[in-house]
Every structure is written in structure tokens, then in C-alpha cells.
Image (cartoon, coloured by chain):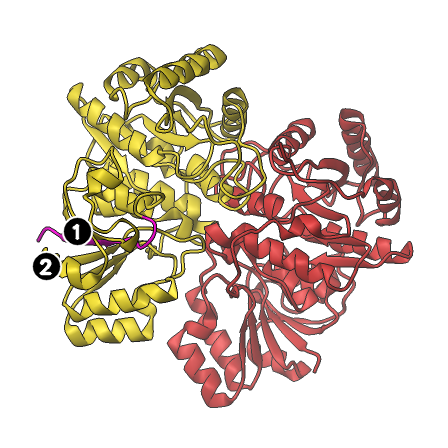
Chain colours: A red, B yellow
Amino acid sequence: MSRRYAILAPGHFAHDAKTAHGVIAYSADETVAVIDPASAGRRVREAVPYLRSDAPIVGTVREALAFAPNALLIGTAPKGGALPPDWRAAVLEAIDAGLEIVSGLHDMLGDDPELSAAAHARGTRIWDVRKPPHTPIFSGAAYEVAAPTVLFVGNDCAVGKMTVALELARAAERAGKKAAFVPTGQTGIMIAGWGIAIDRVIADFAPGATEQLVLQAARSHPDVIFVEGQGAINHPAYAPVTLALMYGAAPDALVLVCDPARAHIESYRTPTLAYRELIRLHEALLATVKPARVVGIALNTRKLDDDGARAAIASARDATQLPVDDVVRFGPDALYAAIAPHLRKGTPCAE
Amino acid sequence: MSRRYAILAPGHFAHDAKTAHGVIAYSADETVAVIDPASAGRRVREAVPYLRSDAPIVGTVREALAFAPNALLIGTAPKGGALPPDWRAAVLEAIDAGLEIVSGLHDMLGDDPELSAAAHARGTRIWDVRKPPHTPIFSGAAYEVAAPTVLFVGNDCAVGKMTVALELARAAERAGKKAAFVPTGQTGIMIAGWGIAIDRVIADFAPGATEQLVLQAARSHPDVIFVEGQGAINHPAYAPVTLALMYGAAPDALVLVCDPARAHIESYRTPTLAYRELIRLHEALLATVKPARVVGIALNTRKLDDDGARAAIASARDATQLPVDDVVRFGPDALYAAIAPHLRKGTPCAE
């Protein structure tokens, strides 16, 4: 049965509700309403112009129920991943109305005694998207995957790594290739209906969990595998997840996704890295296990106008001599065509 | 109450029982017997010459009970960390005899229905050393710690990073400094009685858990903090843990611990890195967040004779122009004296 989502994103929808935006933009499931008192009365596309949806934004769960949702999706992931106390009442109200709860929070709502008892009593389900399965330690089996594997890395969190992976997968399909998208975070999992939130896996097992995802994608014999990226290699908190994807996915090529306006990693004082430094650092690490090169750069130029975007793209191209584009603003076909010839299987290091 | 350990390491004690060896060498708790049919009838120092213990090695839990242990320690950590099926009977026999169970396995023995029911019925305790507490996301508070912080990194797992940290902490104390040892793995926790097994922490939280350990160590106002290292930066499975320690501990200096005989990372085909490559890669990563330099190298020359060890040390010194020694073979005082002048607080990157 397909889902009809009410998306809960109080106070966040117009700004940083990245899960909500991703699901609205890319999921096959329909979003019938968004709950955010700060934007109530507007339509989705009015609050977030690049989302092509006329779904209404309302102030409460009660109002959202008028649009007949069958699931409540937690549409933003607060830092640390706990359920904010004032959202609890909204979740309970949705359970009471018989909605399935879909959550990407670190805190497992299904393990919360009050919420799980309420869902059980009402006969509805809590899907904790981030709950990882048990997976083995990295084995090296990913080195034997036949399809070239592309990993997305970036200059910060939340710059559009998942979006670029999804857009390039569409472009590959349009070019006649069978493309597999590998979800590694909560939004990607909600969109694709499978995957593992690698940031939620026990550190020792994170590369192995990534490897299992690539092996699973390979079973459908794709021509190319696009692995959603996470974090950034110099992110003080999330870099271990980035490195787990780099070694665990055993990529043959990298695509760098950057927001050129970011000066610092999230709220840290750590400066973001320049393109060439990012390329050098990722390639130096992978060269020690299985070499792979950065084959293209996707810029997120959302904060710029068209001229500004073109200037940023030209500047990145000058600095790196690589194909550069904004796949949201200008479409993914040109960047895909530019990188496609460089998607070939590589081999791991061996003495 | 102090512990009197029977250490369970069937088939492994003479070779790779790194937890058993670490506890025997450095814990204040006494080991009264080792259980390993493969070495039964010998003494500890006969099976593992560098351990100065006359404790007997026996074949069964029953025989070990004659030496009046009050705790059974799981003395080796199989890859993946699950309890091998044939060890279950031994653990149950120890519980039945009223012994506390001390385990560093990934699988939580306290969550095992049969073992936890048995322990409950017998009124004894299961201490799952690796069970992590809830800790916050990395905040940057570690940057404000007053004492210089030293992190140990290496060319592979199980090369002696914990041992070198403990030996240099002893040398610092002998030199009149107050030194704090920060345990980040199961053996270190068993020895020091506190700490967090960072490899068992959810990936997103691993740098934050490391930061909490450093903050806890700082509360006793040490002159220097030595943080136990884990894994290796090009370990296909465990590198994310290494990186979590590098960013989370916010070190001011690194000490490189290498076994020069290792050609490959554990059982992977990944080659180990040369000294200069290791130094370059660690320093390049830390330069993006908080710069720190490698200030010395500790070699594990266990497989060499004295002449071979001296040659390996000279070769590493030539290649790197850094202080190099084997702190087990030649004692830690010389290496500590050589690195001490370089232990100064650094500052994180900022634009």
C-alpha cells in the first residue's frame, strides 16, 4: 500500500527540514500535508520554491487529518536525533488517528514505552527508518562487485549529496543504463524503501554495513551503482561515517558535492576545505586501500542567481580541471555525460 | 573488592589473546589461572615470555576453580565480537560457581537470555565492558582542555598502542608529571576500571564519546593526557574508529606505534603504510580540524632479536628524523624524555 504522508516539521519546514524536502522531491509516496505553524496557510511550493508540490501547510496534526494521510513522517532530524518533547503530543495524536509513524531519528520511537504502547493499542506501526540490522564486519566482498560504484562526498553535511546521487541515477537511466541508488541515510531510505542509516551503525560495523548495501544493489545486475554520501571528511563529529562509506563501498570513482557558500562545517569553527584540498584528501585516503579518483563536481548554488551559479561553476572548473555543474538548476544529463566515460572498475591495493 | 581472575582464552593464549596479555601485564587485579587446553600444564611466563606471571594454565573452568578466582574474564575478542558457541558452556560453569563474568565482546552477554538468567539465579554479575553509555555529539569542548593530549596511532590493529600509552604514562609519572591514561577499548577499560569502547559506539556519536573521555580525564588536572589508540587509518573495517579518536580527542601530538614486520592490515590484502606515509596522512587529516604532529615512534620489535630491534629503530629514525624506540624492550623513559619537550597545547583551525 502506498503511503499518504503528513510531514511533521514544526518551525523548520521553510528552512532546514532536509528529510521533508527530500521525500517531497523524490519519493513515489504522496505528501498530502505539512505540519509547521511557522508556515501555516501557505503551500509547499510557496515556502520552498524548488519543491513542485501544492500540498498545504497547516498548523496542527488535527488540521492535517482533513487531507486523509495514512502516515506521519518526522520531517527533520534535530542534532543528536532525539524527539523534541513538544513533538511527542503530535506523534501521539497521529497514532490516536491510526496513522503509521515514520521516523528517522536516532532515538527509536518504537522503543519508547509510551509511543509503542499507544501504537500497539491502536493497531498501527512505528517504522524507525534508522534502526540498523545486524551486519558483518567488512570482508572485501565489495571489491568483486561487477558494476562501477560511485560514492558522493562533499564539503559539509546537508549540501545535496543524496539529491545529486538521485539526479545522476535518473540521468543514467535516461542514457539507457540500469542505475542502482544505494541509500545510506534516513531520507534516502524513506525515498527508496530500503537501505541502512550508516550513521546509526556501531562504528566497528559501519564499513561492513555499507559493503552489504553495495552487495545488495549488485544483485539486480546494474550497470552503475550510486552510493549516497554522508558527512564530510573534516567534519569533527561525522567524518567517521564518511570514512566508513569510503572504505566500505569500495568506490571506483567519487563525485564531489559542494555548497560554495559554506565557510564552516555546520555550527563548528572548522573551515570547509577548498576543492583541490578535498580532492587530495579523499584520493590520498582511498589510495591506501583501493584507489579512486574524483571524476566530477556537483555544486549546490541554491543561494546564488543564474549568473552567480555560472560563475561559481566556472571557478570550480578552473581550479580543478574537472566537469562541474549544478544538477538541480541545470539538470543532471550534462554532468552524467561528462563523467560516464570515467566510470570503470578499479582494483584494491595489494603488494 | 579486588578481582581474582580466571582468564578464558581457549586455543588462543600463547598467540593472540591480546586482552588476556594486557590485563596480566598492566591490571592491578591478580590473574590466578588461565584456561586454554592448548597450553595447559605450562605457566603464563612459559607460554608468553614477556609476561612476568607464574599463574598456571589449565584446561577447564573446573580446574581453574582450584585457584579461587572470583571472576571469569573473556581473554580474547574474536573478529565480529560474538561469543563462540563452545565458550558458552565454560561461561555457564563459571556463573554456576558464583564467578563474576567480565567480557569485552561486541555481543552483550548481559543481554543473552540464558546467561543473564543464570547470573541472576546465582546472584552474580555480568560486566559487559564494551557496553557504551549514552554520550552527546562532539561539541568542541575538548579544545579547551588545559593539558596537552597525546593520541596513539599505528600501522595496524594489535601492534601495542595501549601498551605504549601505559608505558609512557608510567615514564611521565617517574619524571614527576601527573599523567592520565584514557582507555578507549575493552582491555584498557579492564585495566583502568573506566573508559568507553569507542568501537562499540554508534558511528555518529564516536567522536563525542571520545571527547567525553578526554573531558573526564581532564577533571583530575593532569599534566599530560595519553589517549589509547584503535585500529589504523587505512584499516578497511576499523579506520572510522581511528578517525573518531583523531577528531574526538583533539590531540596536540601523536605517537606512532608500528610493528615493522606487518606487511598487511590484519587478514586483508591492504598493505600497511610506510612511516612517512603514515605521518603525512594523519597530519593531513588533523590539519583540517586541529593540527597536530607526530612527535615520536614506538616500534613493536617482539619478533626480532636485540640487534634486529636496534636496526629497525635506526631505520625508522633515518626515515623520519623523529625519536624512535621500543618502550617494552628498552623501557619508556628515553622515548618519553625525547617527546616531552614537544607536548604543548595546540589550537583548532579557524578562519
In terms of secondary structure, where does tag 2 sit?
loop
Q: Position of residue B152 (x, y in %)?
A: 38, 31
| Whether residue B52 is visible | yes
Look at mark 1 in the image and give the residue it sits on: B33
Q: How many marks?
A: 2
> Which residue is drawn at the image coordinates 51% and 82% (left, top)?
A95
- Chain at numbered mark 2: B
Drawn side of residue A249 relative to residue B103, left or right = right
Q: Nearer the viewer, residue A218 or B135?
A: A218
Q: Is residue B6 magenta?
A: yes
Q: Which mark is residue B66?
A: 2
Q: Nearer the viewer, residue A83 or A273?
A: A273
Q: Position of residue A248 (x, y in %)?
A: 60, 48
Q: Position of residue B251 (x, y in %)?
A: 39, 30
> Which residue is drawn at the image coordinates 10% and 50% (left, top)?
B2
Q: Nearer the viewer, residue B175 or B236?
A: B236
Q: Position of residue A263 (x, y in %)?
A: 60, 33
Asked if residue B96 is positioned above or below residue B303 in the image, the reply reads below
Q: Amino acid at mark 2?
A: Ala
Drawn side of residue A74 relative to residue A30, left or right = left
> For the C terminus of chain B, which image quadrant?
top right
> Which residue is drawn at the image coordinates 70% and 37% (left, top)?
A292
Give the magenta-colored segment's residue range. Answer: B1-12
Q: Is residue B326 magenta?
A: no
Q: Amino acid at mark 1?
A: Ala
> Which residue is drawn at the image coordinates 54% and 85% (left, top)?
A124
